[in-house]
Amino acid sequence: MNAADPTRRAALSGRTNLVFFLIAISLLGMAGGMFDTTFNNFLSDTYNLGADKRGMLEFPRELPGFLTALFAGALFFLPETRIGAACAGAIGLGILGLAWRGSQWSSMLVFMVLWSIGSHLMMPVRSSLGMALAQGDRRGARLGEINGAGIAAGIVGCAFVWIVMRYYHENYTLIFVVAGGVALAATLAFLCMRMPGAHLQRPKFVWRRAYWRYYVLEFFFGARKQIFITFGPWVLVRIFHQPAYVFAQLWIIAAVLGMVVQPLLGRAIDRFGQRTVVLTDAVCIFFVCIGYGTAHLIPDQKVALLLLCSCLVADQLLFGTGMARDTYMASIAERPEHIAPTLSLGISINHVVSMSIPTLGGLLWVRYGHGAVFMAAAGIALVLFVFALGMPRGGMRRAPQANNGAQV
């Protein structure tokens, strides 16, 4: 009986940590559902930004994503649970700061960057803690529970935005105060976890010529990602004057559909291979771009708005095809230990593009109209399609080991 006590205590501790982690992820998902669906409308209503300034704003917002490895290294002395608490605190304080001083440009920039630091660093922390808490033969089920908790909580946050913005008319302060408070509550959940041996892996970047096609895929993803994150919603906000609760509704639709689409995408990768999924993604992106860029030419504004909303939902769902890039990297890795650091380098590559593309897109919008931005994006989709034709056919395969290359 005494021999079994440590095992029981370990199992109880694991369940307790999992419960607190699920609470933290749910609270952050709820805060994200509130903040992400209102930030573009907040910028438009508060500052009346043109597309050029909106694009330039993405540089400081995306910079923390590029510097994630640096931030993780600076916190080397903390276990992951404490880093998670720090991230949740940064997210909460950043959002609360926007509620307090968001109407002043310089203050808004400071608190937006603080929120962005917490959000970007939370990504590897969430993945690492999730894997640590998902041991054994139920790993897939555990990860599904964690992701499902975040999605379900995000829907609750969006529903809150829907009610407040629909019936209390653009009360951004209330939304941000609640979202910031919920994120700070996640800090407490992380602090209640006891995993002293869990430390965030600080991956080194791996640069090898053999992985060049994966690097290019990430380059294209960075361009595609930021065009849609920045300018897709901006069309609805500035051209079609849609309120924040509409974005909450669309996010809910995308989240519910995503519960069905995400597993199907995973099966499609296994059955048809990464090449087919990436090619299909490029074709879909092309038509989404055409929809964004030409919807305003439709005489019936209701039909035009329906098309734009469909493009926004489809765009959200297509982000799930990122699994194809990750599994493609795993299939060509010369060594298993190359996978994680190469994926980290891919994130940095797409963030470098994410910081620069919005500025160019904003200038293009101001000079030639928003349609030109999405026609250029459609051109990127075509280039991606041609490039993806060179990917190997079939599903997962592993290349032979090699020792050449360099790490940076």
Image (cartoon, rainbow, N blue to C red):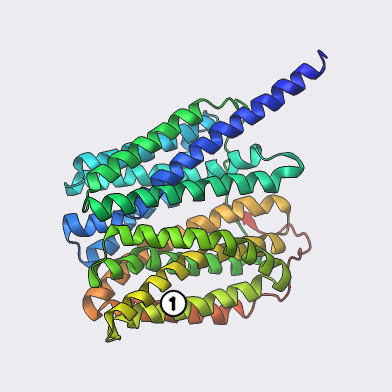
Q: Estimate the x, y position of residue 157 in percent, counting from the top left.
A: 39, 47
x 30%, y 54%: residue: 39
In the image, taking residue 83 as reference, residue 261 lies left or right, namely right
Residue 262 in sight here: yes
Q: Estimate the x, y position of residue 364 in percent, counting from the top left.
A: 28, 75
x 60%, y 70%: residue: 213
Question: Based on the displayed image, in which of its 4 quarters is residue 280 positioned?
Answer: bottom right
Mark 1 residue element = helix
x 42%, y 59%: residue: 251
Q: Estimate the x, y position of residue 156 in percent, counting from the top left.
A: 42, 48
Relative to 61, say whether 380 is above or below.
below
Query: Looking at the picture, which amino acid does disc 1 mark?
Result: Val
Front one among 91 and 18: 18
Relative to 211, say whether 190 is above or below.
above
The quadrant of the picture occupied by the N terminus is: top right
In the image, taking residue 174 as reference, residue 355 lies left or right, namely right
Front one among 6 and 386: 6
Q: Pointer 1: residues within 10 angstroms few (<14), some, or many (20+)?
A: many
Q: Which residue lies furthest to the top in this view?
A: 2
Q: Estimate the x, y position of residue 100 in percent, counting from the top left.
A: 21, 39
- Number of residue marks: 1
The residue to which callout 1 is attached is 288
Residue 67 in sight here: no
In the image, taking residue 385 as reference, residue 168 lies left or right, namely left
